[in-house]
Image (spheres, rainbow, N blue to C red):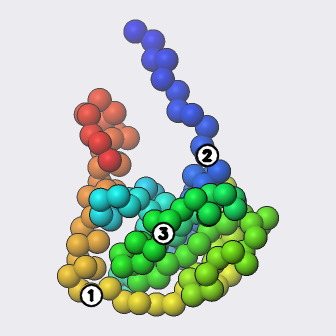
Amino acid sequence: MPDDFTDPPPRPGQLLARGVSRALVSHGFATVQELVPSAGLRVDVMALGPKGEIWIVECKSSRADFAGDAKWGGYLEWCDRYFWAVDENFPTDLLPDAHGLIVADAYDAEILRMGEETRLAPARRKAMVQKFAVHAARRLHALRDPGAGLTI
């Protein structure tokens, strides 16, 4: 039976997430995309650093994308540093200065501003590292065994 399923083309935010992930990997981080830290939240990119630090990067592809997102404040309690990732044409004056700023495209990214650091409590860090590991393992399993019925 032929497989008529094809993936839709990546959305602009997904392209930014890819460029951000590539750049963070070059800095020694491991990344996952679309991780759910708690019910009702889904981060664009979560990065686990070489010293155990946890960063969240929210990718915004347009002014409307930013204006329509009221959930981003809920991400702050799940990371040590929070970043916005936008393309070079995004009006960055809209973004809060307290958080990091990354300019990205589909292939790379550059950190322009480091966000304030707020270290996670040890119990929260342990829970997030475990979520990160489970999410990454399920993604890999789903890629290697698409018929397994895994949901991510």
Position of the N terminus, as image quadrant, is top left
Q: Secondary structure at mark 2?
A: loop
Residue matched to label 1: 121
Disc 1 residue type? Ala
Rounded to the nearest angstrom, the CA distance separating label 1 from label 2 is 34 Å
Residue matched to label 2: 11
Disc 2 residue type? Arg
Residue matched to label 3: 72
- Where residue 67 sits, quadrant-wise, is bottom right
Q: On the picture, is 94 further left or further right than 59? A: right
Disc 3 residue type? Trp
- Rate crowding at label 2 as few (under 14), some (14 to 19) or many (20 or more) other CA atoms within 10 Å: few
Question: Which percent across, then down, holds residue 123?
Answer: 20, 82
Q: Look at the picture and state if 26 lies above or below 52.
A: above
Q: Which mark is residue 3?
A: none
Q: Which numbered disc, 1 or 3, marks the residue that appears first in the sequence? A: 3
Q: Secondary structure at mark 3?
A: helix
Q: Can residue 66 be seen here?
A: yes
| Residue sitting at the far right | 89
Q: Look at the picture and state if 139 lies above or below 38.
A: above
- Rate crowding at label 3 as few (under 14), some (14 to 19) or many (20 or more) other CA atoms within 10 Å: some
